[in-house]
Image: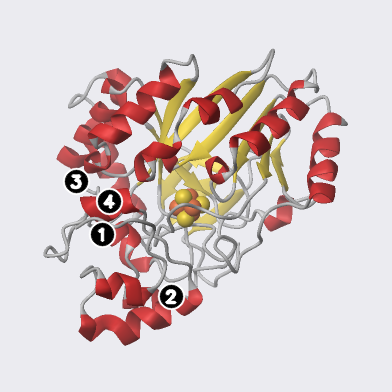
Amino acid sequence: MTAARSLTTVAELVDAGLIAETKRAETAAVAERYAVAVTPSLVSLMDATDPLDPIARQFLPDAAELVTLPEERADPIGDLAHSPVEGIVHRYPDRVLLKAVHVCPVYCRFCFRREMVGPEGLGTLSAKALDAAIAYIAERPEIWEVILTGGDPLVLSPRRLQAIMERLAAIPHVKIVRFHTRVPVVDPARIDAALVAALKASGKTTYVALHANHPREFTPEARAAIARIVESGLVMISQTVLLKGINDDADVLADLMRTFVENRIKPYYLHHPDLAPGTSHFRLTLAEGRTLVESLRGRVSGLCQPTYILDIPGGHGKVRADSRAVEEADNGCFRVRDFRGTTHVYPPEDGQA
Ligand code: SF4
């Protein structure tokens, strides 16, 4: 199956044979609540005959998304609590997120920002809001790294990306610019010479963090897109979300991490899935995740070892999920110590941080 353009409605997904007619009504209810987009590259990668297909399950709406658990929340990692100006999240002293756009080429069904992204989401920063966000960075010499995320910043045109990079290039204390993106695997043709050139800024080092969750995402076209980025001199690192039924298997994870390394991408983060609404069918327990990550030790080279990360609900920051900062408690819960030394219970019992 191929498609000429991205599919963004349930009707289009049914017509393409990716969703059964019998599921039209229930998936339409999901699509009313959360954005849907599947690129042509992904359409051709999906096996519509396999209900457990790890590509399809990441991107096709499912009635299970209509179930929201008490501990799930609209802003699971607490972006809003750390947003001093629109478009900026300043959680740690030396780095900020710059969320210039809340649109993505695809909408992952487990997205931790699913209440913010999409056509009905927070949109693209206005020129005035971008001015204020850049001014915020320029006024704070402690900000060493700017992380462009969103949304997917690589949906912006090369002209707009270059304009942002030129403004960051003019801020002496910013040394590192990092892009978080899914584009090289979901829309590889978009990674052309103009876009790659726009990611560079004089005097700054650019990192591109690729979000990929299954080795099948590395099609020949995706591998070529990654090569265009790496061969232009940019550094690539990885992000993966540990997902039940998609990559919660030692062989799949090992294959995925090796595939990153073979493509000159250093495995960086393996995220424990966040408490985003309607995503419990993707979530495994911390104990299960820790066992899986442990199984990678010895199985694959040190080059292939990611850092297993839990974003503490409520905006308390990241913690290594397999470190002593995360301790199992009696009741199946965990006590988690954040980087400031404060302890939290995970998962939170009452929907609060
Ligand atoms: S690409 Fe990232 S921000 Fe966009 S839907 Fe997927 S996880 Fe969410």
Residue occupying image coordinates x 63% and y 40%: 341
Q: Which residue is mark 3?
A: 249
In three-dimensional space, the C-alpha distance between marks 3 and 1, rounded to whole angstroms, equals 17 Å
| Mark whose residue sits in front, 2 or 4 | 2
Indicate the amino acid at tag 1. Answer: Ala
Mark yes or no: residue 168 visible: yes
Horizontal relation, residue 109 to residue 244: left or right: right
The residue drawn where x is 55% and y is 70% is 351
154 vs 301, left or right, is right
- Say few, some or many: other residues with alpha carbon within 10 Å of mark 4 (under 14 / 14 to 19 / 20 or more): few
What residue is disc 4 on? 288
Q: Earlier in the sequence, mark 1 or mark 4?
A: 1
Mark closest to the chain's N terminus, 3 or 1: 1
Question: Is 24 rendered above or below residue 336?
Answer: below
- Mark 2 = which residue? 31
- Residue at image coords 21%, 33%: 254
Q: Nearer the viewer, residue 110 or 179?
A: 179
Pointer 1: what residue? 56
Amino acid type of the residue tagged 3 in the rendering:
Asp
User: Closer to the camera: disc 3 or disc 1?
Assistant: 1
Residue 106, image x, y percentages:
42, 55
Question: Answer yes or no: do the residues labelled 1 and 2 have beta carbons within 8 Å?
Answer: no
Separation (CA) of disc 1 from disc 4 = 23 Å
Q: Residues within 10 Å of mark 2 (few under 14, many from 20)?
A: many
Q: Mark 1, residues whose alpha carbon is within 10 Å: few (<14), some, or many (≥20)? A: many
How far, Cα to Cα, is label 1 from label 2?
15 Å
Tag 3, which secondary structure?
loop
